[in-house]
């Protein structure tokens, strides 16, 4: 027997039942589930990065369970249910893919070879952003901003990249990568200036500006800053663990080691890493 989405929705209804449900699940609300949603999304990303495909069904299931939670909250409050979520998503994707569904229905298809020169393909991204902008305008009571709907709960690097991308789409961007590099150097110089004045608080603020500029550099290089930093953190962790192993057991061993020895171990870790590529 294989369970279905209907079974999953029934399970959630029982878990939330005031008389027969789980005390923990009954206590949950919109706000309390948000941290779990973010955690589950990261666990999906982690499984993909590790190519742990055998873990993905479970991790994706955990993420889907978060959607089921919110749908249940909406149903209990008479706002919407899971079917509304599916309908809204499908309708939105049909609107945003007129190059695939020309009549805006699931049954419609673009004739094979209808765009032999790839003209439509080159405009797909522009059309996608324009469609999303119109949807934001329709939802907003006040005049829409290009930055509407950039979630505040996103990781800081991801949100900075998305803000920069939205601003760039509205025409607010550097002319080229060199311009972004100049901005990075400018922000770094301001950090150094603040440190020269022994103004630690201002230096901290300028570090934020520096990080934002570096994020825009990553965006212009078509590198996802969140993934880039996660990859760098993984390399740092592997190298640091190698240094620890080379120096022996105990945290104090690391503290007592001369700087030259630490550097030799670190470079050895980098060489070993390059051999594994």
Image (tube, helix red, strand yellow):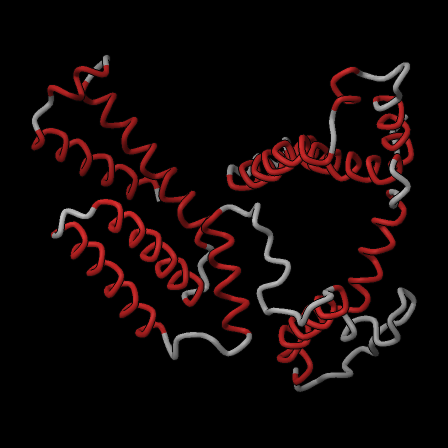
What residue is shown at x 53% (from left), y 37% (from top)? 46
Q: Is residue 5 above or below residue 139?
A: above
Position of 58 with respect to 94 (left or right) is: left
Q: Residue at x 44, y 59 (%)?
A: 223
Residue 14, image x, y percentages: 89, 22
Dividing the picture into quadrants, the one containing residue 81 is top right
Residue 154 drawn at (x, y percent): 55, 47
Q: Quadrant of residue 8?
A: top right
Q: Position of residue 19 (x, y in %)?
A: 90, 15
For the N terminus, give its image quadrant: top right
Q: Nearer the viewer, residue 144 or 83?
A: 144
Left or right position of 229 against 246: right
Quadrant of the image for the C terminus?
A: top left
Residue 209 percent coordinates (x, y)? 34, 57
Marks counted in the figure total: 0
Residue appearing at x 89%, y 71% in the figure: 108
- Residue positioned 25% across, 21% down in the render: 245
Query: Is the residue 155 above or below the residue 92 in the image?
Result: above
Rendering quarter of residue 99: bottom right
For this view, does 260 lie left or right of residue 244? left
């Amino acid at each position: 027997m294989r369970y279905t989405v209907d079974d999953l929705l029934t399970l959630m209804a029982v878990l939330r039942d005031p008389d027969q449900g789980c005390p923990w699940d009954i206590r949950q609300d919109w706000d309390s589930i948000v941290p779990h949603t973010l955690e589950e999304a990261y666990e999906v990303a982690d499984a993909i990065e590790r190519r742990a495909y055998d873990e993905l069904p479970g991790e994706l299931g955990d993420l889907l369970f978060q959607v089921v939670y919110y749908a249940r909250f909406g149903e209990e409050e008479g706002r919407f249910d899971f079917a509304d979520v599916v309908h809204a998503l499908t309708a939105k994707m049909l609107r945003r893919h007129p190059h695939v569904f020309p009549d805006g229905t699931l049954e419609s298809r673009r004739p094979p070879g209808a765009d032999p020169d790839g003209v439509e393909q080159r405009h797909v991204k522009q059309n996608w952003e324009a469609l999303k902008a119109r949807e934001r305008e329709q939802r907003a009571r006040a005049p829409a901003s290009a930055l509407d709907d950039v979630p505040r709960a996103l990781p800081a690097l991801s949100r900075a990249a998305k803000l920069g991308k939205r601003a760039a789409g509205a025409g607010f961007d550097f002319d080229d990568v060199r311009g972004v590099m100049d901005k990075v150097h400018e922000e770094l110089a301001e950090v150094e200036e603040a440190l020269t004045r022994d103004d630690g608080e201002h230096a901290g603020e300028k570090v934020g500006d520096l990080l934002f500029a570096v994020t825009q550099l990553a965006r212009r290089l078509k590198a996802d800053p969140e993934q880039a930093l996660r990859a760098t953190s993984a390399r740092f962790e592997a190298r640091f663990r190698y240094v620890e192993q080379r120096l022996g057991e105990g945290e104090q061993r690391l503290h007592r080691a001369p700087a030259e020895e630490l550097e030799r171990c670190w470079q050895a870790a980098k060489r070993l890493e390059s051999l594994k590529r």
